[in-house]
Amino acid sequence: MIFPKDFLWGAATASYQIEGSDLKDGRGECIWYRFSHTPGMVVNGDTGDVACDHYHRYREDVTLMKELGLQAYRFSTSWPRVLPEGTGKVNPQGLDFYNRLVDEVLEAGIRPFLTLYHWDLPQALQDKGGWENPDSVKWFADYAQTMVDSLGDRVKDWITLNEPFVVAFVGNLFGAHAPGKRDARAAYHVAHHLLLAHGAAVPVIRQHVPDARVGITLDLGYFESPSTNEADQQAARREDGFKNRWFLEPVFNGVYPADMVAWLGDTLQGIDLDAVKAAAVPIDFLGINYYTRNLFVEGDSGLLRTRQVMAESNPRTAMGWEIYPDGLRSLLVRVAKEYAPPVIYVTENGAAFDDPAPANGVVDDPRRVAYLQDHFAAAAQAIEQGAPLQGYFVWSLLDNFEWAEGYNRRFGIIHIDYATQRRTFKQSARYYQQLIAAQK
């Protein structure tokens, strides 16, 4: 595998998944606090109240990053930790934590990539309609200004949103994530306002951080049909429109995909579709999160009338996701050709497996090592085929609170013993350490 000399090797985390600290030190309630404390919404009734206790152990975690040789660290800030009510009065203890974290990361020689929104919307704003409320665009722009005013002198790489598809549809259409709604019209309003919020935040960041590099992270899937039947091919195309093009087209072209607008019809009632041109502000990079391939055929129910089928021949992760590295190569090449982002980063890629307990100071996880090796190779192939890929962030640095799966799934390359908070490198972390050193 050959990567450019300036290629960035990093790892990623998210605030609610690792920080913990309940509602202490002035932190406000977020929608994931409310959701996880609602019985039946998260496996085993788990919450993010403690998680990895990163709020108190961040120095230890940065030391581990430095030992791994990470060149970049992608993390998110918690909106309600900084603005407990979502707007208005700033919590100085919240801002102080992120200032200390950024200083620690920089002192370790690691480049910080800050994600402004990784799903923990202040509950106070959800009580006002959340992302369904058109005012959410200004709420987010004001929050962005608060963060750049505090950190923009040191943080130069900014990501506005993480996975707006999941925020809009997993949270508001499928009801599997916070806030737990099942309303198609509400979900598309949420998606619309997220896109407008991205468009509003980018110039705010640039105005206050003139040398900023700004992007957005989209979770993109590789969609195809195992059938040559025209109806099945169209089903896969609709799913691509639902997850990929509904966000790629606005961000790069300022429009919604026409075929999907026609298909959705009255579901989009009340949305000013032309307003999405505001989402097409120039960005410096596109973050892509990739995990699996999805196969679809024509179905007979549901919003898109599709049915997912399984590829039986390929192995799967503990999440039940097919392991398909070539989907990453294909996706990177396709996005490069069709949308021409100046730079691409893989901002998340990794796998959950049922890891054994630590033994002799290490966790043996050969399947994760193989997963990473194969996906790094796919990324190298994509670069050879013209994709402007300039960095890779493994998901995740730490085992953590895996949203609706609670602590039932482990994605980390560092094992967390939640009872003791002891950190242990997995075999995959040592492999990654060696790879980074070799690439240097």
Image (cartoon, rainbow, N blue to C red):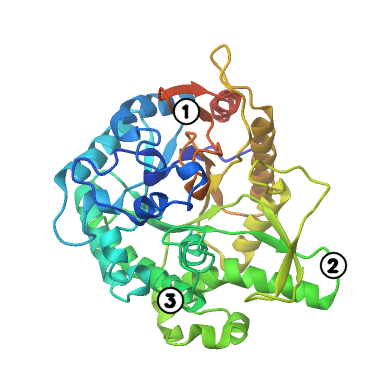
Toward which corner of the image does residue 213 lie, by quadrant?
A: bottom left
Comparing marks 1 and 2, which lies closer to the viewer? 1
> CB under 8 Å between callouts 3 and 1?
no
> CB under 8 Å between callouts 2 and 3?
no
Q: Is residue 400 above or below residue 243?
A: above
Rendered residue at 63%/33% (across/down): 354
For marks 2 and 3, give the CA distance: 33 Å
Q: 251 or 136: which is nearer to us?
A: 136
Q: 393 or 8: which is nearer to us?
A: 393
Disc 2 residue type (three-letter): Ser
Crowdedness of circle 3 by 10 Å Cα count: few (<14), some, many (20+)?
A: many
Question: Which residue corresponds to mark 2?
Answer: 227
> CB under 8 Å between callouts 1 and 2?
no
Q: Which mark is residue 189?
A: 3
Disc 1 residue type (three-letter): Ile
Label 2, secondary structure: give it. loop
Q: Is residue 36 above or below residue 274?
A: above
Question: Which residue corresponds to mark 1?
Answer: 416
Q: Residue furthest right?
A: 228
Residue 110 in sight: yes
Toward which corner of the image does residue 263 lie, by quadrant?
A: bottom right
Label 3, secondary structure: give it. helix
* Sequence-first tag of 1 and 2: 2
Count of numbered marks: 3
Disc 3 residue type (three-letter): His
Residue 75 in sight: no
Q: 113 or 132: which is nearer to us?
A: 132
* Sequence-first tag of 2 and 3: 3
Label 1, secondary structure: give it. strand
